[in-house]
Amino acid sequence: MPTTCSTLSYAETGAFSGLLTDYLAQQPALAPFYHRWPALANFAAQIAEKQAGYSPAARQRLVAALHDQYGPAPAPAIEANLALLAQETTFTVTTGHQLNLLTGPLYFIYKIATAIKLSRQLKETYPQYDFVPVYWMATEDHDFAEINHFSLFGKTYSWDAAGTGGPVGRLPLDGFAEQLLSQLPPEVPAAFHEAYSTSQTLAEATRKLTDALFGEFGLVTLDADRPALKQALVPLLEQEITAQVSNAAVQATNARLTAAGYKPQVYSRPLNLFFITDDGKRERLEPDTTGADCVEVTVRNTAKCHSQAELLDLARQHPEQFSPNVVLRPVYQELLLPNLAYIGGAAEVAYWFQLKDVFAAFGVPMPIVLPRNSAQYISRANAGKLKKLGLTTAEIFRPLADLKKQVGAALGQEEVSLKEQQEALAAAFQQVQDVAQRLDPTLVKMVAAEAQKAAASLAGLEKRLSKAAETKHETAYTQLAVLKDKLFPGGGLQERSENVLSIMINNPDFIQDLLTAFEPLALEFTVLEEQ
């Protein structure tokens, strides 16, 4: 479906944090918290740094694990990118996300589209290298409540899975078809059904769905919850267990962030590691210093307790039983991948800014941190309503009260204000108070009370007169309120709640439209409007 594209600044939307808008404005106060600014010219140094620090053994481990994950017959574009990843001149552009059902909110799609588009632009600028877009599945996350539902056409679809509390990627899809797939509208493309009905686990289904949506563009999806890949964690686990490296680094950064006027996004713990128990639960590791020479680590919610030496031995023998938390997951990612840039939302950008010293402590290059593209999609019907109301796509981001005034002015509505009358009334009662003060001070309070009653009565009249003026154009105001709610569900950005199916069912070319419209390094908010 034909679409037009326009942009506005993130600040103009009024929907993003001060940290993000300050970052995009390149405020000097934030410069100490990121490695390199996201500009094409800066990728030359990023490539050189990663090339020097990424070993052939790491590349071989990655490629072998991906071939094992995908099996013998991945999509042709994916297979071509797996072959490229075996070459020392190939690098990745990575985004990560939870395993939201049927992709969850739109920003999941926007993240991946940004990674694909940036990979293309890097190839144009640095033709001697190759660049592969990667989606890192957060398969080890255990917060099932965050991912077990999605919204489509105003209805929430949920999955009540058994055996939660462990890595969500391992969840079997028992009952999924009956609980959820059978309830979907008939217009939902077959690929969404097939991904889940032909898979054993949530991780497998999520990969198959992303392959169906993005496989033709060469997106490589990675599940890092694999024993072969966890071998890369051993040196990190040793440092973390013996010296609690990451917490010290984060705490130092947090102090500087706070001093610069920004609130830290994530909480760091003494040990930023989870442990996968024998029954498949993902539980936090908590150190307990019981003496000068004895450090014990307990596995939360279990009776298990290990000495530091025991835990080190376990880490060396079975690193697959350890799982990084939000602080160390990015380091694990950068150990595994020949990665140059990480693409994330505003909250992710904020917590990556807490990690620069963590990367330095482990001797791992920090990637360029790039905010994902954000977008507002306006259907043809809603675009027509906007034009009928005399509003532009940029103006619709303004508060509803301001828009009502603008629409009202265009329709010739008289603006009712009794401000001058209120001021005159206040002046008159002040004169009466002055007289009362001279003649009988005990009457001053009575005069003040009467003044308050009169002011309230006048304010009430102003509201009634304003309501009478609005009534003439009540239909237009109702249309405006309905349109505002459709474009900003619950008062928030469309991308934070709407599912891709709400657009793709009517516009099968939606993803291609995004790849055409998005300019990752322009760092502007995109508006797509159907024609």
Image (tube, helix red, strand yellow):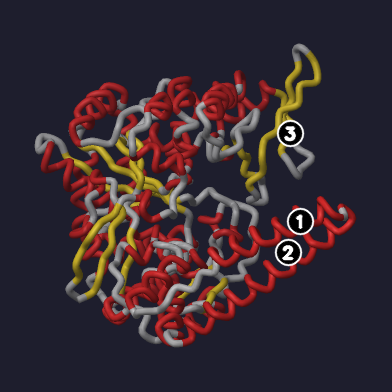
- Above or below, 312 against 377 in this view is above
Report if the CB atoms under discs 1 and 2 are less than 8 Å apart: yes
Picture mark count:
3
Circle 3 residue: 298
Task: Specify whether 49 is left or right of 297.
Answer: left
Q: Nearer the viewer, residue 45 or 487?
A: 487
Mark whose residue sits in front, 3 or 2: 2
Dot 3 or dot 2, earlier in sequence: 3
Residue hosting label 2: 451
Percent x, y of residue 515: 22, 58
Q: Amino acid at mark 3?
A: Thr
Nearer-the-camera pick, 140 or 528: 528
Q: Nearer the viewer, residue 409 or 459?
A: 459
Amino acid type of disc 2? Answer: Ala
Q: Is residue 530 left or right of residue 134?
A: left
Q: Secondary structure at mark 2?
A: helix
- Of the numbered discs in the image, which one, if any, rests on residue 433? 1
Tell me where residue 244 appears, x and y as whole percent: 60, 23
Q: On the rendered image, what quadrant is the N terminus found in?
A: bottom left
Q: Tell me which label, 1 or 2, sits earlier in the chain.
A: 1
Between marks 3 and 2, how big is the CA–CA gap? 69 Å
Q: Amino acid at mark 1?
A: Gln
Circle 1 sits in a helix, a strand or a loop, which is it?
helix
